[in-house]
Amino acid sequence: MSAGVEHHDNVLLTTQPHDPISGTTATARVNLGVRSTTWDVHANIGAKSSWFDEEAFDRDEYQIRLFSQFRAPRSHWQLDGSRLQESLLTSEEVDPDTGLPRFQRTRWTETVGPGWIYSMSATTQLQFRLNAAHVTYEEGGPVILNDYGSESASVVFSKQWSPRTTFSFTVAASQYDVPDNEFESRTRSAYAGMTHRLTPVFRTGLSIGGWRNNSRGVGCAEYHTIDFDGQTVLVCVTGLVDASESGVFFQADAERQFKRSRLSGKLSRDVRPSGSGTEVEFDQASLFYEHQLLASRLWAILGVDASRTSSLSGDPAGVDRDYYQIAPRLRYRVNRDLDLEASYRRARQMYERLGDAATNDSVYLTLTYRPPRMTRSR
């Protein structure tokens, strides 16, 4: 559990005159699990409440995540599920909805994902995976966010070529539906990948392939700019959309462990669902660095994210935007159960259509208590 204070000077990411806000947060989280020699079940449950000096920014968030698996001599079954309620305005994880509404909005996400892994030999595997998600948004404000459902299926063939190198080939299909607009989008993709461990502490990965998307229905044919409550916002003008697009999928990542540090990075491009009423091409680059300054006491952490969101249908400049975020942190371990963390985050966003950039500077101070883990065996 944790408690903290935070301050934002432009939490709405607006270029119009605005006031800073400050608030307090309280978070509780529990991890539960049961395991045996052939199966295990885990649950991750958390809740967070935030109170600000402007009541409109108060929010309650929670997450429930379930993980289960069953192991047989050559098969491995999995079943995952989750239910999340989160604020889009101050979410720390960058995704295609980050910065989209520029107003306080809540998103609810429900997911379920069964999977099966079959070991054809000691070095060869065949994996089948299904995923389904249903996403709804809080109503209000001039920016309409569209509830949607998405489903995907994938087949992955992987071969361990050597103790350090594994090759894989993936074929996937997904669909994205916006019921209110009778809008549907279908994407097919195929890509090959490789992971290679250069040394026991240095791992790299590369995947590359292509995708094709077909979409049809009522979508955002064009966007207009209006002034709402002192902000310039983009408003969707609906119309019939019928489009086909294709592109490149890729992901490159690397991780290096040092004696007192860890460095990882990722560069990717893929197609993802979003609340803008269409699937989007999402480019992302991220960097994470962690260094232990004092043995078992003080850590310096740096996270950097950059993303570009591009619409696949309708007005191409409607939701196209760039988002950057840098977040340095200092974490001090007071004792075995107590951490004190101070962090700063700078976020910058620019819509292609609006042509101007908005910046938000945030500071956080958080005290986290972790009670001793409780286990029971029989």
Image: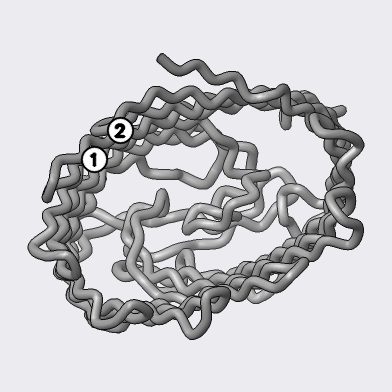
Tell me which label, 2 or 1, sits earlier in the chain: 2
Q: Say above or below: 71 vs 352.
A: above
Q: CA distance from mark 2 to mark 1?
A: 6 Å
Q: Say above or below: 345 vs 244.
A: above
Q: Say above or below: 346 vs 248.
A: above
Residue 111's spot in the image, x, y percent? 32, 37
**Image marks 2 and 1: residues in contact by CB distance under 8 Å:** yes
Q: Residue furthest front?
A: 378
Of residues 22 and 367, the one drawn nearer to the viewer in this rendering? 367
Q: Residue furthest left?
A: 120
Please, what is the three-letter code of the amino acid marked with disc 2? Ser
Residue 212 visible, this angle: no
Which residue is depicted at the point 64% across and 76% down?
A: 355
- 138 left or right of 177 in image: right
- 143 left or right of 82 in image: right
Q: Secondary structure at mark 1?
A: strand
Quadrant containing the C terminus is top left
Q: Which residue is mark 1?
A: 78
Which picture quadrant has residue 103?
top right
Q: Which residue is mark 2?
A: 68
Of residues 215 and 325, the one drawn nearer to the viewer in this rendering? 325
Which residue is depicted at the point 73% across and 28% down?
A: 370
Residue 2's spot in the image, x, y percent? 77, 28
Quadrant containing the N terminus is top right
Which residue is depicted at the point 35% across and 60% down?
A: 272
Which residue is depicted at the point 81% across and 27% down?
A: 3
Residue 104's spot in the image, x, y percent? 64, 37
Residue 240 visible, this angle: yes
- 19 left or right of 302 in image: right
Q: Say above or below: 221 vs 252.
A: above
Which picture quadrant has residue 168?
bottom left
- 229 left or right of 221 in image: right
